[in-house]
Amino acid sequence: MAHRIELGIPRRLPRPAPLEGVVEHRQDLAVTAAGDLGGGLLGLLRRTGLLLVRQSRGRAWIPACLWMGLIWFMSSLSSPLGRDPRPSLAFFGNLAHPFEYGVLTLLLLPTAQRFQGWIQFDRESLGGRIALILSYAAIDEFHQSFVLGRHSSPLDWLADATGMYCTLKVAAYISEPEATSAGVGKRCLYGVFLCCLAAGFTFLDV
């Protein structure tokens, strides 16, 4: 039995089967039938996911670590938006928080355990990755407190966590056999709304 992550609440479900018609595991290779991936946004995201899992779990750590290094470098910059940025520019700067950690989450997914060539979305597989992302976000916020012109904020950390959550939500949904492009679109829009809301909340700390 495996714990499926759904809206942050673990549910006890049988271990899921791979996407029907999407992934076959033959001789340790993920073989895909492009016509069975679905069309529109769903098909695009599934193809992206399959490209990511073509990496071995070990090699998948390389782009994830490079992205973590880039996040650290960006956090080391003093006043990257200028000393007194316009509110609109400052908002997009704050929106970078969920974007950075959403991408990090996406890059870390291929390092998790897989079942017949597809990522397992359960607590055992992803719990450590979630802890790593949240811990790194906290360390990065602490690091910013030592950078001239920057400051550390729990609201920034919350924005980082929001980006992670929204990415996991969409990624888990597209692994479901009954997923649709309309369902993906709704979740993407909901994710964008949450990320914008989290970016807006960061202004409360100013």
Image (tube, grey):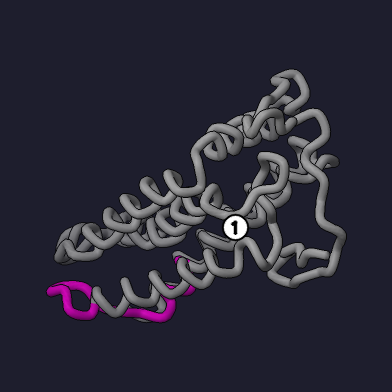
- Could you classify mark 1 by the number of other residues whose Cα lies within 10 Å: few (under 14), some (14-19), or many (20 or more)? many
Identity of the residue drawn at 68% across and 67% down: 123
Identity of the residue drawn at 69% across and 34% down: 42
Say left or right for 201 vs 78.
right
Locate residue 197, reporting x and y percent.
Answer: 53, 65
| Kind of residue indicated by mark 1 | Cys
* In the image, residue 190 lies in the stretch drawn in magenta: no
Figure quadrant of residue 144: bottom left
Task: Tell me which segment is drawn in magenta.
Answer: 145-160
On screen, 14 above or below 31? below
Locate residue 150, reporting x and y percent.
Answer: 21, 73
Of 189 and 106, nearer the camera is 106
Q: Quadrant of the C terminus?
A: bottom left
Would you say residue 61 is visible in this rendering? Answer: yes
Say left or right for 22 vs 99.
right
On screen, 1 above or below 172? below
The total of numbered circles placed on residues is 1
On screen, 6 above or below 21? below
Query: Which residue is tagged 1?
Result: 166
Identity of the residue drawn at 46% across and 66% down: 133
Identity of the residue drawn at 60% across and 69% down: 127
Of 78 and 169, nearer the camera is 169
Locate residue 203, reporting x and y percent.
Answer: 39, 73
In the picture as drawn, the residue positioned furthest to the front comes out as 27
